[in-house]
Amino acid sequence: MLILTCPNCGVTAEETEFHAGGEAHLKRFGPGSSDNDFETYLFMRENPKGVHFERWRHVYGCGKWFHAARCTTTLEVFGTYSAQVTEPPKEILDTISEKRPGWAWRDLA
Amino acid sequence: MSKALSALNGAKWSDGIAMIEEVALQGMITLRGNLDDPKIKTAATSAANVDMPGPGQANCADNRGICWMSPDEALVLCPYDDVAENIDMMHKALSGLHSLCVDVSDARAVFEVSGPYARGVLAKLVPVDLAPDRFTKGMFRRTRMAQVPAALWLHDTDSFRVICFRSQAQYVFDLLTVAAQPGSDVGAFR
């Protein structure tokens, strides 16, 4: 079972108290963008085996959104962090590098 | 004005291992804003007459209290008849400040689950560690009770309070009575 800690209220709970919000750190391409960018933004998602970054919402708790970095094969959570960032904080990346040397995710490594 | 009725009109059930009772007509005010702001704190504490709780905590005594709901939301408990007056007072104290206070007394239902097995009964329903040394008086937890959202705290020794949406009051009452059926203690906490 996936155990997440909400960085907004500090509660550690199992995944049924949360709701998954899809892949993290997407850049939006809206009106005026090229068809190719728009299609990529809408449909193209990572589906990694290993390190992954996701958005989650503490839906049955404080109701706030946050980001989580986790491993999709072991359900190990490397850390959770604020929703108000466009890329993972350095300490999360360092933790992942320590636990999964050589990892890569989109343009992060 | 018509007579105020709570969701289940104070329904009570005591045929099982814990007593389940609806706490009828509990006054509840949702207060949103920056909870670190002294003005917001004062508005909450003067309406409830208790100290401001920290994150994940609740300060409750009888039918008064403050529950920490999220980083920008507190639930102020006060007697049902004092709600309008308290909201007036809070509006005045918070004018010009980015904040919101709303009477939610009739939008929620409050239950009391009490008795020596109350912990075990609730532990069957919520994904929260309710072990006596892990969930203590003063803690407040919003969580999932079977299929619906609920918030709970230890109001007194062996006596929990549970808040849910009014529309789900019957569901929660039924859940609690099923979880408290006679002979259904699982002995997890003793």
Image (cartoon, coloured by chain):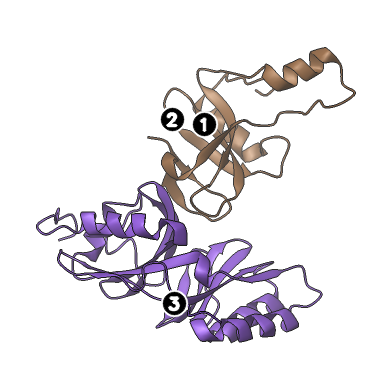
Chain colours: A brown, B purple
Q: Secondary structure at mark 2?
A: loop
Q: In the picture, residue A33 is in which quadrant?
A: top right
Task: Report whether mark 2 lies on the same chain as mark 3.
Answer: no
Q: Is residue B49 left or right of residue A42?
A: left
Residue occupied by mark 3: B25
Residue occupied by mark 2: A75
Q: Secondary structure at mark 1?
A: strand
Q: Is residue B91 left or right of residue A30?
A: left
Identify the amino acid type marked 1.
Arg
Q: Residues within 10 Å of mark 1 (few under 14, many from 20)?
A: many
Task: Report whether mark 3 lies on the same chain as mark 1.
Answer: no
At a point 55% along the width and 30% down the height, the residue shown is: A96
**Is the C-beta separation of discs 3 and 1 under 8 Å?**
no
Q: Pick whichever, B173 or B146, lies toward us.
A: B173
Residue B100 spot, x, y in % from top left: 69, 69
Residue A67 spot, x, y in % from top left: 60, 39
Q: From what the image shows, is residue B178 above or below residue B76?
A: above
Q: Is residue B17 visible?
A: yes
Image quadrant holding the C terminus of chain B, namely: bottom left
Chain letter of the residue carrying label 1 = A
At a point 11% along the width and 59% down the height, the residue shown is: B182
Separation of marks 3 and 1 at Cα, in angstroms:
44 Å
Separation of marks 1 and 2 at Cα, in angstroms:
6 Å
